[in-house]
Image (cartoon, coloured by chain):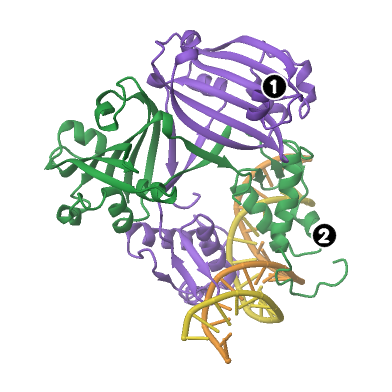
Chain colours: A purple, B green, C yellow, D orange
DNA sequence: AAGTGGTCTAGACCACGAC
DNA sequence: TCGTGGTCTAGACCACTTC
């Protein structure tokens, strides 16, 4: 305890646990505390900041969650050794992204077929062959220009209500986001040649494209597999890393 | 309180706050609690689980951090509405990645020049023209095959000790990771044609490539700008989303 | 006005693991 | 063994915002 501190610190500009977190984060980012450095124990910090152990613990736990600190019982708390970069990538809904950019969104449904999963479908969607699925292909346009080509498989066994939806009126991705939210997903990002997508995208066949492949799951069951192809010259993905979930 | 619960719940297979978190997460992922649904208040949950409010708060705060919940004073806690997908992308150190794959890593330093930043350098690295920099180009090889081409600008004003390092012995990226750890970074991922990278990568000029561009900062100062080009046919980036920072 | 979340306290017991 | 972090409690005051 330094001076006045009986109980409340409502949130005077910033909560104390946030200040402690920022302090420590600052020392790590600035290099004052290099990887492997042993951070003061919770007990020490509690004395330094004149607060309870819970408050210090909150700050340190968060930093450990975000990967900056490594905590071991008895041993103590240490600054982690980074082994590469990690970043949070946002993959917005395509119509959303286009409209946010102030452009006019439109889309064409190019193909739609309801069928039983072939071996190839089954491999992509991770379902048993024969499972009823919906296979869609569409093209997203921004201000009338081809923006992305999309091929999608939808597991009708998992999302039977999708069978009755008119996907020429609303893109399947947006519909799914509203009707089957909070799923788990695996993404893969690749570079490919336009090739078979050249025509719908109005590109030369060897134009480089960004391919984003996503398999969406819910409680272990496959919901959808989607492959989105973006012309390389007008699309990129941005990701940023901030050291503490800030 | 239901039955026995005087004080300690050490961690009987799982901490209580983790169980509460998993319960709620499960309800959201399963769709039982759809977006916009009002989650029971901390007080209610505290009664349901027979624990203190702090424990409930810990679980809910974490879920709010990870984006699944939206908390507002007085109003309550609600399931968030997702607007797209977000995923954590790992961008490992290239040598690390290759060796982890059980392949032999080697690299060639193709160019190295120390100079004052030109206008073009300055724009990429976000420094003032004239700042002393190191410009490097190298090629990463896996089992003797070209794996990636890398162009890097290094701000010698920010990392003066790099001037004395022999980057033909160790790749700059790995050196930086060890000597200037825990930086902030901005990434951009694009698809491009091999073009000027075709020769070092032993590719046809129109082969699609994945280009990862990264600017690394420390306390607002630019450290390095790197552009890595990976042949599209043998490289991809994987990212996964787990709904609760788990 | 009242109920919500945000923060904080001053204790406590326990498991782990470096010594 | 014993210091460390991991967890938990039963309170507390406050700010905010909806009612």
Residue at horizontal 75 percent and vertical 21 percent from the top: A162
User: Which secondary structure lies at badge 1?
Assistant: loop
Q: Which residue is mark 1?
A: A118
Q: Residue at x 20, y 53 (%)?
A: B162
The answer to whether residue A9 is seen in the rendering is yes
**A11, above or below B144, in the image:** below
Look at the numbered disc 2 and give the secondary structure of its residue: helix
- Give percent across and percent down for residue B15: 70, 64
Q: What residue sits 67% from the left and 32% below the top?
A: A126
Of all residues shown, which one is farthest toward the right?
B3
How much space separates mark 2 and mark 1, taking CA atoms? 51 Å
Residue B77: x and y in percent read 71, 45
Left or right: where B29 falls relative to B236: right
Name the residue beneath numbered marker 2: B47
Could you say where residue A245 lies in the image, as x and y percent from the top left? 50, 50
Q: Residues within 10 Å of mark 1 (few under 14, many from 20)?
A: some
Tell me the tag on residue A217: none
Q: Is residue A48 left or right of residue B74?
A: left
């Amino acid at each position: 305890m330094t001076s006045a501190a009986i109980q409340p610190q409502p949130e005077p500009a910033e909560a104390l646990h946030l200040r402690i977190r920022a302090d420590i984060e600052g020392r790590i980012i600035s290099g004052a505390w290099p990887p492997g450095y042993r951070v003061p124990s919770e007990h020490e910090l509690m004395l330094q900041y004149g607060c309870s152990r819970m408050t210090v613990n909150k700050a340190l736990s968060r930093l450990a969650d975000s990967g900056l600190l490594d905590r071991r019982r008895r041993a103590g708390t240490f600054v982690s050794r980074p082994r590469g970069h990690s970043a949070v990538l946002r993959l917005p809904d395509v119509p959303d992204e286009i409209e946010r950019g102030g452009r006019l969104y439109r889309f064409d449904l190019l193909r739609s077929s309801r069928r039983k999963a072939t071996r190839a479908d089954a491999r992509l969607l991770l379902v048993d062959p024969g499972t009823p699925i919906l296979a869609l292909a569409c093209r997203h346009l921004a201000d009338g220009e081809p923006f992305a080509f999309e091929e999608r498989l939808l597991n009708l066994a998992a999302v039977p209500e999708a069978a009755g939806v008119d996907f020429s009126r609303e893109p399947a991705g947006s519909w799914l986001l509203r009707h089957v939210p909070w799923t788990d997903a695996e993404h893969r990002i690749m570079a490919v040649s336009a090739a078979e997508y050249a025509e719908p995208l109005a590109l030369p066949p060897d134009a480089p494209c960004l391919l984003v492949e996503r398999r969406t799951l819910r409680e272990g069951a496959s919901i959808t597999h989607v492959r989105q192809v973006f012309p390389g010259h007008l699309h990129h993905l941005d990701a940023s890393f901030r050291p503490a979930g800030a």
